[in-house]
Every structure is written in C-alpha cells, then in structure tokens.
Image (cartoon, rainbow, N blue to C red):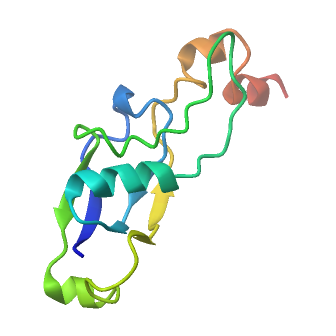
Amino acid sequence: MPLWRFVPVASRNDSHWQDRRIWHGLIVRAPSAAMARILAERAEERESRGAMGNETHSYRGGFADANLYWVQRLSDDEARKYGGEAGEIGVVDPGTYEETTLSVEYGPTMVRRGRGPASREAAK
C-alpha cells in the first residue's frame, strides 16, 4: 500500500489555518491520497481549547483542505525507510508540528480588549 507525505503549502500567517497546528513530515499508509487525508484527520489529536461564546470544538486538522496541504506519494526509496508499502493502514510517522502565526483566539482584537496573553504580560 502506498505511503503519502503531507506538505503544508499555506503560509504560517494564512487565516485558513484557523488556529490549527501545522504538521511537517506526516506520513500515512493508505490506498489513495484521498484516503490518506481521511486517515490523517482521524488520527489528529488536537488539544482542546476552551470554546468562546457559542463556538463548538473543532478537531479537524485541516488535512482534507488542499489549500493547506499537498499530499505526495513517497518514492520506493523513501518508502523503505518506513517499512515499505507492506504494513498496516494508518499514520506511519506523525512528524512534528508548529503553531500558526496568526491566531483567531489571540489576535490583535483580543489584545486590545485585554483578554489575550500579550495583554496579560503588559499588565504585569
């Protein structure tokens, strides 16, 4: 079964990230790129932040969004590093993540209103 690499393509300060983590080096074993996106979404364990107002928690990692991630099939040489194409379906390597530069939760408006982390630091 082929191995797929997720490559983030949107800028760190792109608002499409919507406070999602940006994953680098995520490798998934799946029969197709579309199935790899589904499996990555299921496996993403996002820490739960408190909801604001009537918001609901979103556990979507953005892997299904082609504007955030491209999915590339690994070459045979690269696939051997992860046990080749033989193996169980699912995430093979979770990679690493970084936070977005632009935060919906801690944007400039939150700082002006005295609710963001920067305003708390300024108050000290």
Is 82 displayed left or right of 79 in the figure?
Answer: right
Q: Which of 44 and 38 is in front in this view?
A: 38
The residue under the point 31% across, 58% down is: 36
Query: In x, y percent, where is residue 117?
Result: 71, 30
The residue under the point 34% across, 89% down is: 83
The residue under the point 55% across, 31% down is: 58
Is 96 displayed left or right of 119 in the figure?
Answer: left
Q: Quadrant of residue 112?
A: top right
The residue under the point 40% across, 77% down is: 88
Q: In which quarter of the image is residue 27?
A: bottom left
Q: Nearer the viewer, residue 71 or 96?
A: 71
Q: Nearer the viewer, residue 32 or 12?
A: 32
In the picture, the quarter occupied by the N terminus is: bottom left
Image height of 106 relative to 81, above or below:
above
Is 95 displayed left or right of 71 in the figure?
Answer: right
Image height of 29 relative to 115, above or below:
below
Query: In x, y percent, where is residue 42?
Result: 48, 51
Image height of 57 relative to 27, above or below:
above
